[in-house]
Amino acid sequence: LRQGTPMTITPLPLSHTIDGVEYTIHPVLIRAEAGNYLVDCGYEETVGQLIEKLLEAGVEERELTGLIITHDDHDHMGGAAELKRLNPGLKIFCGAEEADSVCGKVKSERLIQAENSLDSMPERARKWALSFIEMLMNTPKVPVDVLLGDGDEVVEGIVAVSTPGHTKGHISIYLPGSSTVITGDALVLEDGRLNIANPQYTLDLDRANESAEIIRALDAKTIICYHGGVGEMASLSS
């Protein structure tokens, strides 16, 4: 992968409360010569907060060129349809293996996983599980404009890297000119250490570990995780 031009990379931390617990997620704004690209976009409920963060970074939602979806999980793409409504010219990118679920042609892997878990779930957990399934079923879908494979460029200097495991079509985004990887859920930053994201939600743990090694092999110093924010490649556990 060739070196690109340095870009402005801005994490946009969003807070969201679920069942009384506050979570922080980190979509990322990339300002490049070719336009403004957002990597993941949060929940449907956090779109207003996302727009405020974009404005703080100097970009209106109508000035976004593209949205890159790392994978089809509700916290990563729940707001995509609303962003597309607000900005009809917004181009939607995602990994080729995720496109059919992102646009609603098939069920997401997460929904299938949740449905399949019901039979073995303790009765006390079924109410939560059923509400989770309902939320996944109601996550707004969005048409996909560009399918990304391993090594494909969104534009020069913004490179998709196949990092399956969390889901089968998960991608990360490599910015060689800035020595940065945006990992989505391929990795999580916890207590200053980079590790595999929650195994409970990782559909293929062996492939997830292989993807961690793929990320480790990139010529990058900085990692931005959707859950945990900015870390250093040196903190990736072996």
Image (cartoon, helix red, strand yellow):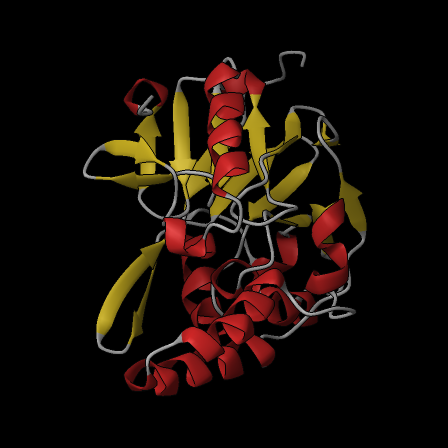
Residue shown at the point (50%, 20%) measured from the top left? 178
x and y, in percent, of residue 190 in the image: 25, 41
Considering depth in this image, is 44 or 213 the residue closer to the camera?
Answer: 213
Please give left or right for residue 211 compared with residue 156 in the image: left
In the image, farthest residue toward the front? 120
**Residue 68 rendering spot, x and y as whole percentages:** 63, 47
Give the residue at x 41% y 36%. 224
Res 106 → quadrant: bottom right
Measured as percent of width and height from the top left, residue 73 is found at: 54, 60
Residue at far left of view: 191
Above or below, comparing residue 135 to residue 41 in the picture: below
Q: Image quarter for residue 33? A: top right
Horizontally, residue 200 falls left or right of residue 64, namely left
Decide: is 164 above or below 6. below
Residue 133 vertical placement versus 47 (above, below) = below
In the image, 27 versus 70, the foreground residue is 70
- Quarter of the rendering occupied by the N terminus: top right
Residue 9 vs residue 60, the one in the foreground:
9
Q: Residue at x 59, y 47 (%)?
A: 70
| Observer able to see residue 95 | yes
* Badge count: 0
Q: Residue at x 64, y 29 (%)?
A: 158
Q: Position of residue 238 (x, y in %)?
A: 33, 21
Would residue 78 be seen by someone viewing this image from the given angle?
no
